[in-house]
Image: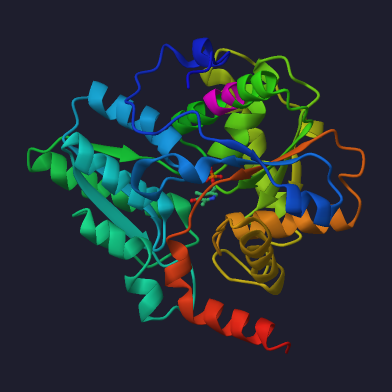
Amino acid sequence: MSLSNPATALVSSYPRVELGHFPTPLERMANLGADFGIDNLWVKREDCSGLAFGGNKVRPLEFYLGAAAAAKADTVMITGAVQSNFMRTTAAAAAKLGLDCHVQLEDRVSDTDEIYQRSGNVLLDRIFGAKFHHFPEGEDEVAADRQVNKLAAELSAAGRRPFVIPLAADQRPLGALGYVLCAGEILAQAARDGIDFDHVVVASGSGLTHGGLLVGFRALGRDDIRVQAMCVRRDADSQRQRMRRRAAMIADLIGHDSLIDEADLLINDRCFPPSYGKLNAATQAAIAAFARREGLLLDPVYSGKVAAGMMHMAAAGDFAHAKGVIFIHTGGQPALFAYEPALTTAYTKMDNGS
Ligand SMILES: *Cc1c(COP(=O)(O)O)cnc(C)c1O
């Protein structure tokens, strides 16, 4: 199925490699829609983006690795949480493109067990043949970037051509172009299928996904679409600060200035606590609701928290007047296996009625 994507022209000057299966499906969630009192509830299946269990890092990688190919890189490097989905898909893409891959695992989550350290995405990184590095300080993005750049300099000195995928807020958010494209894809799909929507619910971590979608809709003239972001990495005040800057940088990448104003930044951290990568009861309940009512798997770190936030807003009546709501399923399911002990305990308790 091909779609004519109105955002293609916005990003066509950037090199890109094809890695994913697009367009991803846009499906109705009739059961949860009825449960939440939302007539038109949809899920955009970014978890089905194809490469190595999919998720929302495949579209950004098409642009980062496009830039890497243009720079004739032979090695790609990335830093992130131990259970990073970005690392897993980078390791897979590097394998496919014949590049070496170095991953730097940051200790972002306290009190983790062996299963967290070895299973889920870490196991997959290992299968893809990634080379592992460790960084002890999980809350210092800039220091983590500095460290990975130091490793890159060492590789360069040894005659390699490394390309570093940057994550810190001051770096050029090239990967967000993938979500500018996704905004166009959603508009084309909705138009083709007669889907009326005015709300999108999405995770906001690095902000590539949130920022790309928001800037994409605005650049395509859709000021009516409310992009509701849910915090997964830091609280709403810090995330808003980050997104102001990110949104401006993304708009700049596609040749616009001041597309986004303060009222566009709808950021909710109700279901974020206690911290990055730590489960809470609302997230456990949301994972169960999506699984048991729709046969859909969410993850404990990102999409589960976003779904919990959406359920909380629905219960408060925040979508009562919505024409339609699209939940962006960003993937992340391999982490379910890294959180196995906590999830087994939670659902055993839930099903025993305690
Ligand atoms: C990385 C990730 C996010 C957050 O997306 P950003 O673009 O970093 O804001 C959400 N969900 C999943 C499953 C992820 O892996």
Name the residue at 64% across, 16% down: 257
Q: Nearer the viewer, residue 244 or 177?
A: 177
Q: Is residue 226 shown left or right of residue 252?
A: right
From this view, report whether residue 36 is shown above or below residue 219.
below
- Give the residue at x 39% y 50%: 53
Is residue 182 one of those drawn in magenta?
yes
Residue 231 falls within the magenta-colored stretch = no
Indicate left or right for 172 with 328 as reference: left
Residue 303: x and y in percent read 59, 54
| Main secondary structure found in the magenta portion | helix
* Residue situated in front as seen by the camera: 189 or 98: 189
Q: Residue at x 11, y 38 (%)?
A: 160
Return the residue nearer the eye: 94 or 140. Answer: 94
Residue 197, quarter of picture: top right
| Residue 163 visible (yes or no) | yes
Compared with 182, 131 (above or below) is: below
Q: Position of residue 89 (x, y in %)?
A: 35, 46
- 272 is higher (above) or lower (below) than 15: below
* Residue at x 82%, y 52% (from the top left corner): 34
Q: Is residue 168 among the parts visible in the rendering?
A: no
- Residue 120 position, x and y percent, is 38, 65
> In which quadrant will I find the C terminus?
bottom right
Q: How many marks?
A: 0
Q: Which residues are magenta?
A: 181-185
**Relative depth, front residue between 293 and 185:** 293
The answer to which quarter of the image holds residue 345 is bottom right
